[in-house]
Amino acid sequence: MDDVTEGRAILDVRDLQVFLPTGARTEIEAVSSVSLHVADGERVGIVGESGSGKSVTGRAIAGLLPTSPRVRVNGSVRVAGIEMVGAGRAAQEKVRGKTVGMIFQDPLTFLNPTMKIGRQVAESIPRSRGGDRQAEVQRFLAQAGLEDAAALARRFPHELSGGMRQRVLIAIAIAKLPELIIADEPTTALDATVQQRVLQTLDDAVRTLGTSLILISHDLAVVAQMTDRVYVMYRGRVVESGTTADVLRAPRHPYTQALLTSVRSLTDDGVPLYSIPPSLRRSLDEELTHAS
Amino acid sequence: MTARDAIVVPTSEEPPELALTTPISNPGQRRSRASTTRAFLGKPATIVFLIVLAAIVTVSFIGPYLVGNPVTTSHPILHAPDLEFLMGTDALGRDYLARVVNGGRISLFVGFSVAFLCMTIGLVIGGLAGYYGGFLDAGLVKVAEFFQVLPGLVLALVAAALLGSNVWIIVAILALTMWPAVARIARAEAMRIAQLGYVESAKAAGFRGLRIIWSDVIPNALPPVLVATSMTVGRAILIESGLAYLGIGDANNPSWGALLNTAQGFMQTGWWLAVFPGALIFLTVLAVNILGDSLNDALNPTVGRVK
Amino acid sequence: MRAFVVYVLKLLLSSFILFIAVLTVLFFLLELAPGDPVQTLVGDAPISPEFRAQITAAYGLDLPAWQRYFIYIGNVLTGNLGYSFGTNNEPVLDLILSRAGNTVAIALPAFLVSTVGGIILGAVAAKTRRKWLDGGISGITVGLFSIPNFWLGMLLIMLFSLTLGWFPSQGKSPYGEPGIAWQYAVLPVITMATSELAYKARIMRSSMIESLGQDFIDTARSKGLSSQYVLWRHALPNALLPMVTVAGYSLGFLFAGSALVESVFGWPGMGLLFVDAIHAQNNMVVLGVVIVLTVTIIVVNILTDIVYGLVDPRLRVRFTRKPTVAAVPKEAKA
């Protein structure tokens, strides 16, 4: 199921497995044996419905799972050659500080309401880089598409609109000049009109920096627009992968096919409304349980 | 599909109960009664303090018939505790154990009646206020502010000074000062439920507000209200014993606080006079508070929220 | 700035209405008091007919209820809280103010100790990974929270005063000496602070846990910031916000609870004055203390609301920035 691509892999994930606690004595296997890789400068999408484990995968790569000792991670996650699974806190913080940037979904809750914007962006700039921090902050805010960056830096998150806040999150991610950006549903919380513009900004920023990108989304259109390759996840597993064009045009796995049909039934005329039938889910679940 | 569907280790959920007033829907994500009860009883601290509380209540209501006479003054004066007088004797030669045992009734009575009144009044008014909003709601907020500015102890003291120190007056005043806190919790629940989508459709379908309140708001508000009420018991007992300590109360039936009032003068010569009644107040309030905490934990499980 | 002034004015107005409401309730209680209204005001002391006539005139006791009400409100608002009949007929307000300082002398340190201690304890309990520490602190706080404060005072006296002799047990200074000797204040302050400290620690703990569970903590972590930094600079400031309100509102309770603590230690403050007046049926003083207490609590609450409005950026911005559209930066066109 894996495609082989040339180029240095900025990210190499093998057999990732994540257990999350769900109750006092219960847990769930949110991710079971996921393998993927991202080459230098590549843009890769992870697509799936809610609960498929795509967000958990993204967080596991960045090392941002909950710090409870009941969270268990197995397998290997190599970021720029550095192993993250089982690495000490200092090592992980170093990687997060310089190499991997993450853009989250809901900018209102993901920004500190009591801290000024400028400071929140400045925190992302590694100390070692030196130089005039204020100027840097404004440069990244501008690069994220925000006008009047100097005034903006003095404001608090609640004073900005949703789209602007999301751009701040983008600025935070690019400020550290990372090699890999993971964007977890970056536009889901935004209005449709704002979505396109923010995506465009993200596109420009990634291109300018030459960063690799992992775009996690349940929205096939967004993934189609922004990525070269895509992984389709269902219930904690990768069920299909390939170039975005291939997968979306000629899906091989029944789940991907069903997914595409249901999307088209919403957007295209004349296609009857379709949702993934329980029978398909059942056979998929059986197939996947046997596969482990 | 959510995480719930994919639970690896199964929990034994009971089939949903059919109450007499079947809720129109079940909007709460609360656990089933069985797992809540199990969570509540699961901690050793809970069981211990349940026993402690039960023991205190039993002793307070049955004990008086079993111990000696609390009023006869024929025993040696200020006798330290020993095998014959388990809690010693007081300055008038009375059996202190008997006095302490008799002292529980009033405190417990006040504590639980106040809590009961607060719960019923708070639930009803809070539920109505939260659901209907408007004047009732604004009024409730104002009343809550009022009692926040005039602390219960102070108001009770003034009332006792002017109107006499009758148990019922004390219960009434304390209930009056404490019901707003409970009502606010009920109000929050009612507001939450009132704006749920299904309520709109229920109203459109013709269900009357009162019916919705009875079948949905109140059952869902009950758990947090219960927790708040349990806190009320402790506070009421503390205030009542404070009042008794200051001399407000029935001189012939001294509650624990009143015993402490007399004990004040004998701190040097009779340590047991102060220690035992106070310890009992402490244990009772502690038990109630710990049970309230366990109840809270059982009803609001917070899973893996540590980041 | 204008929004801020409006905010404060609204606070003052609603507080004033609250105050009048309290006075009304007190008046109501006075009316309900059984027996001779003159005796109610004067207490047990026997009085001459001329005096009785004087009182009746001064308080309008022969007038209909609603007129009495306005006389009463008018008196209070002009600072006339009546006269203390039990003692040497001082004006009640003066009597109260002379004792208020003593209460503040123990309430303020108790406030500081309980707030600082509560914050530290709560923060430690919330962030620690060692379950025994968190559980231990939680257990201790529940315990301290459940102790009747006057009993705690008695225990402290029995242990530290009578047995160990470290601190004196009664009064505020050696007999006959003016002012306050600090050794006399230690036990009362501890007694007052303990219960409040436990309460604040519990609140701080849950505030901190909630703050640590917020999404923006994830963003902070994603910047590679150390967990210490995230704790101190992101989680803690947000957790402290609700504590401002809690601390402010607790000051009122401290003053109210002083009645019990001062009784245990014989500390000559407002609380003891209150209790003595109740026993002596000196009801003018009783009401006077309640009124002064209410005013104090209202003032403290107003200050708390103002401070909170300035400290929370979400509110502060609303007050200090001009709400013109042009001032809000625009998003760049795509």
Image: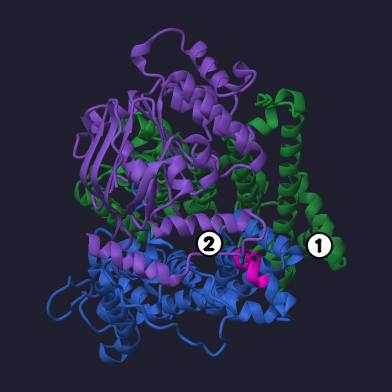
Give the chain letter at badge 1. Answer: C
The structure's colour scheme is: by chain
- Look at the image and give the colour of chain B: blue
Report if residue A239 lies within the magenta region: no
The residue tagged 1 is C56
Which-is-in-front pick, marks 1 and 2? 2
From the viewer's perspective, is residue B185 above or below residue C235? below
Mark 2 crowd level (few <14, some 14–19, many ≥20, 10 Å Cα): many
Report if residue B193 lies within the magenta region: yes
Q: Quick one: quadrant of the C terminus of chain A?
A: bottom left
Q: Position of residue C224 (x, y in %)?
A: 34, 28
In the visual, does C167 lie left or right of C4?
left
Q: Secondary structure at mark 2?
A: helix
Residue at the image position 38 percent from the left and 67 percent from the top = B5
Q: Position of residue A191 (x, y in %)?
A: 64, 43
User: Which of the numbered marks, if any, corresponds to residue A245?
Assistant: none
Q: Which residues are magenta?
A: B190-199
In the visual, does C308 lie left or right of C39?
left
Give the chain letter at badge 2. Answer: B
Mark 1 crowd level (few <14, some 14–19, many ≥20, 10 Å Cα): some
Residue in front for this viewpoint, A247 or B2: A247
To the question of a shared chain for discs 1 and 2, the answer is no
From the viewer's perspective, is residue A233 above or below residue C116? below
Three-letter residue code for mark 2: Leu
The residue tagged 2 is B153
Residue in front for this viewpoint, C12 or A8: A8
- Look at the image and give the colour of chain C: green
